[in-house]
Amino acid sequence: MRVKTAVARHKRIKKIMKLAKGYDQGRHRLYRTAKETVIKSRVDRYFGLKRKKRDFRRLWITRLSAAVRAKGLSYSRFIQGLKRAKVEINRKLLSNMAIYDSNAFDKIVALAVQHN
């Protein structure tokens, strides 16, 4: 008895073609080309998301460094003080605090200086 893969194959093709919607020319029309493009786009997306996380962390650190330097402290001393004070606030929140809530940020800087 032979194996019939029509339904499974159509599902597989349909899934790829749906993902390739919006691509130009044969990339959304031809299965093989669409499949290559979808695979490549997913690889790029994966690395892009990793890159995005890295870039945002760099941005937050740069902002924090600038904000802390204005208070007469280096970034590394600031982070060291926070660790010693057992303050566990991530860099994103600290960065937003430095921009939007300077009073609270001043208190955190004072705490870091106190524990250095």
Image (cartoon, helix red, strand yellow):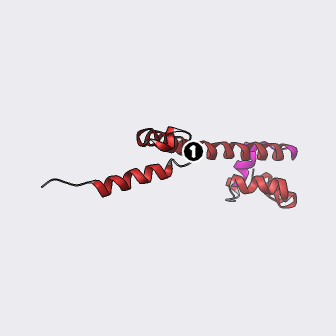
Looking at the image, can residue 43 be seen? no
Q: Which residues are magenta?
A: 70-82
Task: Name the quarter where the N terminus is drawn.
Answer: bottom left
Q: 22 or 85: which is nearer to us?
A: 22
Q: 91 or 49: which is nearer to us?
A: 49
Give the prevailing secondary structure in the magenta stretch.
helix
Left or right position of 51 against 102? left
Figure quadrant of residue 107: bottom right
Amino acid carrying label 1: it is: Lys
Q: Position of residue 57 (x, y in %)?
A: 67, 46
**Residue occupying the point 53% across, 45% down:** 46
Is 41 magenta? The answer is no
**Residue occupying the point 73% across, 51% down:** 81
**Residue occupying the point 71% across, 53% down:** 92
Q: 88 or 112: which is nearer to us?
A: 88
Looking at the image, can residue 104 be seen? yes
Left or right position of 70 against 64? right
Figure quadrant of residue 50: top right
**Residue occupying the point 84% across, 57% down:** 100
Q: Position of residue 63 (x, y in %)?
A: 78, 45
Q: Which residue is mark 1?
A: 50
Q: 41 or 27: which is nearer to us?
A: 27
Figure quadrant of residue 65: top right
Q: Position of residue 58 (x, y in %)?
A: 69, 42
